[in-house]
Amino acid sequence: MRSIAVSLAFLMFVPPALAHHSVTAFFDRDTTVEIEGTVTDIFWRNPHVSFTLAVVNDAGMTEEWELEGGTTNTLIRRGFTAESVSIGERVKAAGAGSRRGEPAIFVSHLLLPSGEEVILSDREAPLRWTSPSTDETALASAADVAGSGIFKVWGYRDLYRIRSPLVLTSAALAARDAFDPRTDDPGLKCRPPGMPNAVLNPYPMEFIDDGDRIIQRIEEWDARRVFHMSEDARGQTQASSYLGYSVGRWDGNTLVVDTTQVAFPLLDGDGTPMSESVAMVERYTLSEDETRLQYDVIVTDPENLVEPAIWENTWVYRPGLEVRPFECTLRDTVSPVYR
């Protein structure tokens, strides 16, 4: 029989959905749905891995449930691969339920036939049914990174957060109200997000010293940004792009980056519009022991924002972390959740 438990989850803060497509537009993170069934299909791809389960309901009828999880890269880092579960195996799953009542969850926890429990969401979470073994999230010591400065691979420590709610113009409010995530979300079409979305995600990124430029490699959507560091780069223009034109400078141990000429229609995954008048100031502040990177981005858009929007998070160095290929892949069929 199907076992479904729905409970209210206590959340300290739920930030607007920026990365991938807007998960919160389709799934309610304030509820937890638990199911158990047999795996009938596995779709191993980015931006989200998905499974289907055959679940027998209380009436004895078999229902097909869809489970959507994090990226392949996140799961691989947690020791879960495409071979970790097979079609025909029975598993238990828990996660956020569909907002429209569809048989679907954004899965956070999966209990395998072996008794191993894995976290499948992109967010860190405590285990639900089992006890943790060893802590694999230990951070590097100062001795591990001495002298490398900002130029290494960084993993996120804290999920990004917005300092205060967005204050929108009337035109922006109307545009956001008209936004339909099932048809208007670029992420569903594997279209990479523009700034600031490109940086606000829970995946690794790397800084590379390239002389009078700094290259920023971001795992999500395989983004590659260029920060022009020479003095004559200021005041120059180039064709607008979804990542914009970025000029950087050092302020002590802080890399300050000014970005303009961003050509992307959305500020976030909730449909808040963004104009080409937008300007962004980022600050990457390196800790004294070079193991942490404090980040904030201030977004100004007079056409859509009454007040500047500010997001912040913390990156940390973990030995052995790599920026993996993302390679978004469209499904052959559209998930019922997004129809």
Image (spheres, grey):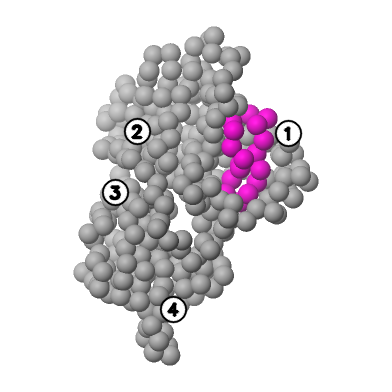
Under circle 3, the secondary element is: helix
Q: CA distance from mark 1 to mark 4?
A: 47 Å
Q: CA distance from mark 2 to mark 4?
A: 40 Å
Task: Name the N-terminal-most of marks 1 and 2.
Answer: 2
The answer to whether one can see residue 154 in this image is yes
Q: Are marks 2 and 3 in contact (CB under 8 Å)?
A: no
User: Where residue 265 appears, x then y in whole percent?
Assistant: 62, 40
User: Where residue 178 appears, x then y in whole percent?
Assistant: 69, 54
Q: Are marks 1 and 2 in contact (CB under 8 Å)?
A: no
Question: Residue tagged by mark 4?
Answer: 4
Q: Is residue 322 left or right of residue 247?
A: left
Question: Residue tagged by mark 3?
Answer: 77
Of tags 1 and 2, which is closer to the observer?
1
Of tags 3 and 1, which is closer to the observer?
1
Task: Name the N-terminal-most of marks 2 and 3.
Answer: 3
Q: Is residue 159 left or right of residue 78?
A: right
| Amino acid type at image mark 2 | Val
Q: Quadrant of residue 82?
A: bottom left
Question: Residue tagged by mark 1?
Answer: 302
Question: Residue tagged by mark 2?
Answer: 153
| Amino acid type at image mark 1 | Pro
Q: CA distance from mark 3 to mark 4?
A: 29 Å
| Magenta region includes residue 264 | yes
> In this picture, is 152 found above or below 19?
above
| Magenta region includes residue 263 | yes
Task: Name the N-terminal-most of marks 3 and 1.
Answer: 3
Task: Name the N-terminal-most of marks 1 and 4.
Answer: 4
